[in-house]
Amino acid sequence: MMKKTIILSALLAGSMMAFAQEKAKPEDTEIWEPIPKVVTPGATFRDAPSDAIILFDGKNLDEWVQNSDGSPAKWDVKDGIITVNKNYGNIETKRKFNSYQLHLEWRVPANITGSGQARGNSGVFLASTGKGDAGYELQVLDSYNNKTYVNGMAGSLYKQAIPLANPGRKPGEWQTYDVIWNAPVFNEDGTVKTPAHATVFFNGVLVENNFELKGPTLYIGKPQYKAHGACPIKLQAHGDKSEPLSFRNIWVREL
Ligand code: MG
């Protein structure tokens, strides 16, 4: 009796499988839920969409602190823009992020002087893992007729990824970065489960295409991952003597 039942069910399952194969329908592979959230896009590609966290809207640095000690950010806010104040070092967001979409705009002053890395140098640390320049830097630099190592020009992931193009505008003009940051994921023992990946549009042009980082960006030496959690986004006050850059319209969407 038992044996018969097993044979019968095996036969039935087999024939049902064949039946299912023959009768496959388009609906079988349609996914209906969960429904993606409706988001109202901005009027232009630069305007923050409805679900963005506004990190700077031209008014104040309420979302920012000094990277060195967590005190209120001391860079200059005037006429709707932030200008780096090199006396006070890097600033970073109060909030911590994992993966996100980021928009920001930056401008090298029209009267910029210097050359190479000492000409309009700043940076966006996509994840700030500590003080100073610890983290993963998307380079900001005047790369308009300014020669430097290509893995250190604007649009580079510093010393790891050369930009795919140079769509940089002249000093004095506003430029945009749109970034998709997929934060690294670590196993419980601290080893890397998934490395960080970055996609970067510079003035609307793809310059980094889902680039896999080898670890935090370093001035000297070879990168190596060290486990971390959610991190602030940090802006660099570079130590060179050239005139300070400005930023505006900074927003982020968590992924
Ligand atoms: Mg820099």
Image: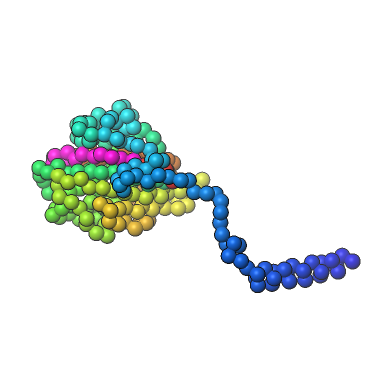
**Which image quarter holds the N terminus?**
bottom right
**Residue 209, located in which quarter of the rendered image?**
bottom left
* Residue stretch rendered in magenta on the structure: 240-251
Q: Is residue 159 above or below residue 81?
A: below
Q: Residue at x 69, y 71 (%)?
A: 19
Q: Nearer the viewer, residue 245 or 139?
A: 245
Q: Position of residue 169 (x, y in %)?
A: 18, 51
Q: Position of residue 243 (x, y in %)?
A: 14, 39
Q: Residue at x 25, y 29 (%)?
A: 74
Q: Which residue occupies the extreme top position in the image? A: 71
Q: Is residue 166 left or right of residue 185?
A: left
**Residue 85, located in which quarter of the rendered image?**
top left
Q: Position of residue 86 (x, y in %)?
A: 19, 34
Q: Residue at x 24, y 39 (%)?
A: 247
Count the marks. Answer: 0
Q: Which residue occupies the extreme front position in the image? A: 43
Is any part of residue 17 visible from this angle? yes
Q: Is residue 241 magenta?
A: yes
Q: Residue at x 12, y 44 (%)?
A: 110
Q: Position of residue 54 (x, y in %)?
A: 35, 37
Is any part of residue 134 visible from this angle? no
Q: Is residue 109 magenta?
A: no
Q: Is residue 225 above or below residue 83?
A: below
Q: Nearer the viewer, residue 16 or 234?
A: 16
